[in-house]
Image: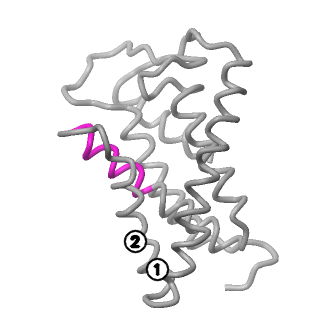
């Protein structure tokens, strides 16, 4: 996942030059945030992919279930948001729900989805500074700022879609399709 984030970030850097500088958080705070994300994300993964995916896929199949649950997962993250922020949240969380669901389906373990979810949230919110929250690093743009350009949204939707395709296509050693 980290190589995908870096590749997309480099591509975006060609469009709108930026650099990362130190942010207000220290590594201990990032580690604590990871623990918090891990706990919350484990519960989300148990609910959506550990239970609902299994139950719904019995009726409509795995692929359709992933899509239905992606929409539900996106809506689950909606409370308190409106307008463009709500649309961005639903799009990013739905795209990543497909990634987490495919990670579970393809590996046969929910730990893959939980780890990706917790690491992805930590990377977005507390390391990479792409959500506007206090983080270990923050983005400073050195080029002209395009109207409505949201690097966190673009990076995480692009990485989510790329990761979903990779999880769907690339064989996993030791697993049969």
Between residues 162 and 108, which one lies in front from this camera angle?
108
Q: Is residue 87 magenta?
A: yes
Give residue 36's position: percent from left, percent from top: 64, 35
SS state under label 2: helix
Would you identify the image quadrant in which residue 16 lies? top left
The disc placed on residue 63 is 1
> Marks 1 and 2, Cα distance to the nearest angstrom?
7 Å
What residue sits 62% from the left and 65% below the top?
103
Left or right: residue 121 versus residue 92 is: right
SS state under label 1: helix
What residue sits 25% from the left and 46% below the top?
87
Most frequent secondary structure within the magenta stretch: helix
Q: Is residue 147 magenta?
A: no
What residue sits 48% from the left and 59% below the top?
97
Between residues 106 and 11, which one lies in front from this camera angle?
106
Give residue 84's position: percent from left, percent from top: 21, 39
What residue sits 43% from the left and 88% below the top?
60
Left or right: residue 12 versus residue 137 is: left
For label 2, count other residues whose C-alpha is less than 10 Å away and answer few (under 14), some (14-19) or many (20+): some
The disc placed on residue 121 is none
Measured along the vertical axis of the image, is residue 115 above or below residue 172? above
The span shown in magenta is 84-95
């Amino acid at each position: 996942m980290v190589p995908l984030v870096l590749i997309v970030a480099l591509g975006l850097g060609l469009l709108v030059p930026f650099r990362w500088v130190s942010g207000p958080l220290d590594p201990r705070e990032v580690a604590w945030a990871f623990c918090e994300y891990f706990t919350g994300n484990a519960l989300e993964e148990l609910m959506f992919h550990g239970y609902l995916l299994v139950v719904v896929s019995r009726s409509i199949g795995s692929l359709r279930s992933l899509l239905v649950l992606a929409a539900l997962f996106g809506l689950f993250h909606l409370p308190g948001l409106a307008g463009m922020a709500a649309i961005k949240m639903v799009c990013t969380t739905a795209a990543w729900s497909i990634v987490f669901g495919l990670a579970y389906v393809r590996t046969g373990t929910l730990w893959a989805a939980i780890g990706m979810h917790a690491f992805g949230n930590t990377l977005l919110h507390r390391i990479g500074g792409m959500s506007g929250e206090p983080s270990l690093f923050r983005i400073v743009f050195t080029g002209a700022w395009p109207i409505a350009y949201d690097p966190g949204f673009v990076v995480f939707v692009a990485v989510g879609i790329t990761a979903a395709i990779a999880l769907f296509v690339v064989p996993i050693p030791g697993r049969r399709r």
